[in-house]
Image (tube, rainbow, N blue to C red):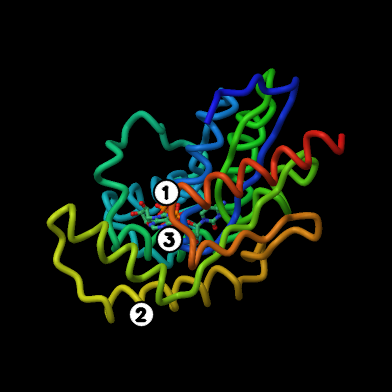
Amino acid sequence: MSREQAPAGLVIAVDGPAASGKGTLARRLSAHYGLPYLDTGLLYRMVARAMLDAGHDIRDPDAAASLVSIFEESAFAEDTLRGREIGEAASVVAAMPAVRSGLIARQRQFAAQAGGAVLDGRDIGTVICPQAQAKLFVTATPEVRAARRHKELAGRGETATFEGILADIRRRDARDSGRSDAPLKAADDAVILDTSALTVEEAAAAAIAIVERRRTAR
Ligand SMILES: Nc1ncnc2c1ncn2[C@@H]1O[C@H](COP(=O)(O)OP(=O)(O)OP(=O)(O)O)[C@@H](O)[C@H]1O
Ligand SMILES: Nc1ccn([C@@H]2O[C@H](COP(=O)(O)O)[C@@H](O)[C@H]2O)c(=O)n1
């Protein structure tokens, strides 16, 4: 696929549940349009990492609220953030209103760059960038997501059973969708992209076609 010139201020919001493939598609969109990309899940993972490194109980909202305003993104190596346990811990701190509000400015600042940006997460289309020109809600069945993550972890040498990963995904879905502040849900004007039966290439082509329809409708 050729690289397109992004029109001024093209903000693309990509939301969806864990392991749905939203990061893969957000990176493809970023490369296709030449836009900067932010994986907002990493911010919640950093707060969780900082909590655990400091020896705090991950459920302590006061400790999380104090850390969220001071942590330095450059202090974390990405490979210390990507594991299963940090994903689970991140979804615990992500349910805390003070953590969510403490991360809003960083995300909006990123989205406000000249030319635009691609952000992926859970609340990009609903809360962080409700004005985004293109919104995708990427989904796949829990079983397909668990199988993809199982393959990914096996490739990294991590030992985890398919059943264990499926249980993680279901627990995380329930927590992310059930919280009161910025729950995981599709924005009213998002296009749902179910990738369960799509290859990465097919899903990327579908995602670009969705953005193109939104761009030309502007
Ligand atoms: N359409 C697809 N077909 C097959 N595998 C895919 C597809 N999309 C993504 N994957 C693979 O599934 C795994 C999860 O994808 P990805 O990391 O993009 O999901 P995510 O939604 O960003 O996850 P998380 O919320 O945990 O950050 C990766 O190993 C990725 O390569
Ligand atoms: N915009 C977002 C992004 C992430 N979260 C929470 O962080 C957890 C980890 O995110 P990954 O995308 O890296 O899997 C996730 O389970 C959410 O709880 C969020 O709330 N909002």
Q: Amino acid at mark 3?
A: Ala
Find disc 1 in the rendering and name its residue.
Answer: 47
Q: Is residue 7 above or below residue 88?
A: above
Q: Position of residue 2 (x, y in %)?
A: 55, 25
Q: Amino acid at mark 1?
A: Val
Q: Is residue 182 above or below residue 118?
A: below
Residue at 28%, 81% (x, y): give it: 163
Task: Kindly tell me whether residue 63 is visible in this rendering.
Answer: no
Quadrant location, the C terminus: top right
The secondary structure type at the circle numbered 3 is: loop
Residue at 62%, 59% (x, y): give it: 193
Find disc 3 in the rendering and name its residue.
Answer: 19
* Residue contact between numbered discs 3 and 1, judged by CB atoms under 8 Å: no
Q: Position of residue 66 (x, y in %)?
A: 48, 47
Q: Residues within 10 Å of mark 2 (few under 14, many from 20)?
A: some
The secondary structure type at the circle numbered 1 is: helix
